[in-house]
Image (cartoon, helix red, strand yellow):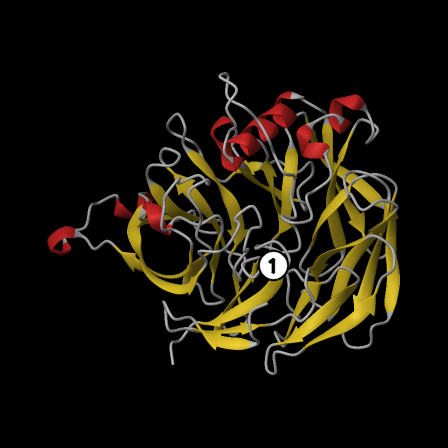
Amino acid sequence: MFPAAWTDKSTGHRIRRLSTEPGTSTLYFNYSSFTPSGDYLIVSTPTCISKTSLSTFETTPIISISTPFKLLFTGRKTRTAYYSLQAHATQGYTAKTICAVDIDTGVSRVVCEVEKGNIQALNADETLLAGVDIDLPPDHPRIANLQISQPRDPRFDQVDFRAKWPDGTDMCYADAKEVGLDERLEAGIHMKLFVVDTATGIRRDVYSSTDWLNHLLFSPTDPHALMFCHEGPWHKVDRMWVLRLDQHPPAPVKVHEREMNMEIAGHEWWSHDGRTIYYDLQTPRGLVFWLASYNIITGERRRYHLKPEEWSVHFNSSPTADLFCGDGSDDTMVSHTKGATWLYLFTPRAVPDVAGIKAKNADQLVKAGYLESRRLVDLAGQDYRYEPNAMFSPNGKWVIYRSNMGGERHVYAVEVEKR
């Protein structure tokens, strides 16, 4: 185990270990993980949901849970952490109970019972949960026999994908995962996207498709704007879509249009003000790397170029969107680049007009730029099958991440400013 605090010798940045219990984990990089006032980070351990003070960095339990559970997200309006209980450790599309616990008192309540489906998102005013469901029993062979449906490897918090090339040699993890995703996509299972009223528990189906619907994410400010993805190998799908639930019927709007074979876009997230969607863009995959954005209000698009060794499994933005972070990668991931195992801080820089001469249609074109990088943490010992899922603290002073570098899974924070 790493010490409670130290300075990274390679970068000079101060790091704190926030967790004391092995197996402590943060949420996925784009999920709501903090209290509305920004004073606490909410994490899960094998047996409880805990809170970490972002002033003292002390982690204390909120509630102990003796049955299989999953921490889902925090409320943006109330000081509440939402979680699910189910009969089996594997979530899937099985029946589950959605609960909410008061972060300050530890008092828990049942929000609703979900007979079938996977709850993935909570809207900005905490009136709606959103989830996806399949038109098959969860144990039906068409879904149960897929590699993606197998139990998650607890070491990595995801399926340990395996696949072979035609000559019998093993694929690297990233390629094997693509095979598993493609297998699920090609199954063509009919799905429904639904919402549940948190006051009444009433479910309402809002969209259906034989596309693989996944990664639901409500706007942090607009309770009616719901982003979702068409899951699968990114070069085969138009991944990112937005539904407005106040439209009847809701009509999905595509966030990004692919223009070349093997172009990929994904690992999307909302800006903190809910106006912009950011995402990883590669034109083509593994060769040219961008951090792209789309303003859903104005339609403005931006693309920031970055070097292959700066590409990260996930990116994230600071509360004021003047900085980005990335959790790096190893040579088995998409970029297949050596020396990329760093937690990065990025400053966006715009490409200026040549000689101050502006094109007449400049405002209608994609605005170009690049990311200026600074290394925060040396992650050379990270097994990237366990994704660091970096995120900024609400005050923008720390980047929080999870890591298995010490042999055990823990949560850490690195200070953005170097002392």
Tell me which corner region of the image, top left, top right, bottom left or bottom right, holds residue 82: bottom right
Q: Position of residue 256 (x, y in %)?
A: 46, 38
Q: Position of residue 179 (x, y in %)?
A: 56, 27
In the rendered image, the quadrant that contains the C terminus is bottom left
Image height of 357 relative to 79, above or below: above
Which is nearer the eye, 321 or 402? 402
Residue under numbered circle 1: 220
Give the left or right position of residue 173, taking residue 82 as reference. Answer: left
Tell me which corner region of the image, top left, top right, bottom left or bottom right, holds residue 78: bottom right
| Residue type beneath disc 1 | Pro
Image height of 138 relative to 270, above or below: above
Q: Secondary structure at mark 1?
A: loop
Residue sitting at x 57%, y 57%: 404
Q: Position of residue 140 (x, y in %)?
A: 82, 25
Image height of 132 relative to 98, above or below: above
Give the left or right position of residue 263, taking residue 275 as reference. Answer: left
Residue sitting at x 68%, y 44%: 153
Residue sitting at x 53%, y 36%: 173
In the rendered image, the quadrant that contains the N terminus is bottom right
Give the left or right position of residue 262, taking residue 102 as reference. Answer: left
